[in-house]
Amino acid sequence: NRKANYAGLLQDEGEFDRSEALYRDCFGKAQQLADVHQIARVGINLANLLTTLGELAEAREIAEVVFRHSLQHGLTHGGVKVQLVLLEAAIESEHYRAARRHCESVREDIERIDDAVVRGEHSILEARLLVAESDVEGAIEKLARLGVPDVSGLAVRLAMERVACEAAMPSGSRSVQRAEELTETMLGMTEDAHDELRWRALAYHAAVASESEVAKRSRHAASSVLKRFLESLSAPRRETYMATRRRREQRSWLDTGSVSSPLLHSETDNHYRR
């Protein structure tokens, strides 16, 4: 338990390589000991982290194992949380039909449990899916109505997702005042965040900034923070982290300052730990 908790702390601080190694060790030991609850808890955390790092195939494999395990042992909460990981991985993989199936199949289960964080996570992920399905206005409306508890970093993720949706809007259709207000809130909430979170916040700031010089400064700042973050990862992890279409597009835009559809795929920082 203590080692798994420490892995979670490292993940919160952006120490992803060290966190991954600890999670893998804890997951292996939980399986050896047939520790029902630790298999679910650590497995969800590991699959979640691998999704963040772009290791989507392995993340899905572990999540599916944990999902079957949760069903077998009647772990309702575990089953719901791991389905959120599967939903996230499907979105990142651009498997949107599969993502929609996960989104709908878990909805009834969420209604049966009293967990505002899980409900908030599901709503944020569904907003991401709506953007991928070209319903950006629907995503904006959904998030505008969403209230979330300020725990597990959920409020930060909601703030980032709202700005991401504004970034996905055509510039002529975007509410400049709303975008700037949301961006200021997001930047304040991520000012002291770890580099993986901060570079994305700065990228969104650049995407919706109404003044070209402000956008330019944020692009340069985001590129600098991203470079520092990638240097903190092992070489293989740098490649997988940048392998998703969303991140490739973001990096290309940061490097060139030119984008045909700004940050088309919306964002969420994806932690479902307990």
Image (tube, grey):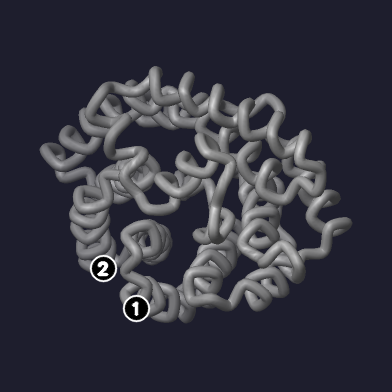
The structure residue drawn at horizontal position 30% and vertical position 66%, both measured from the top left corner, is 74
Q: Which residue is mark 2?
A: 71
Q: On the image, which quarter does residue 197 sit in?
A: top right
Question: In the image, what residue type sits under mark 1?
Answer: Arg
Mark 2: amino acid: Leu
Q: Of the two numbered discs 2 and 1 on the same chain, state the one appearing first in sequence.
A: 2
Q: Residues within 10 Å of mark 2 (few under 14, many from 20)?
A: few
Q: Quadrant of the N terminus?
A: top left
Q: Secondary structure at mark 2?
A: helix
Q: Is residue 202 above or below residue 7?
A: below
Relative to 196, does residue 54 appear above or below in the rendering? below
Choose mark 2 or mark 1, whichever is in front. 1
The residue that disc 1 covers is 97
The kind of secondary structure element at disc 1 is helix
Observer-nearest residue: 205 or 107? 205
Res 115 visible: no
Residue 64 visible within the image: yes
Q: Kindly report the distance in space between the C-alpha atoms of the residues bearing marks 2 and 1.
A: 23 Å
Seen from the viewer's position, the closer of residues 224 and 123 is 224
18 on left or right of 265: left
Residue 260 vs 189, above or below: the answer is below
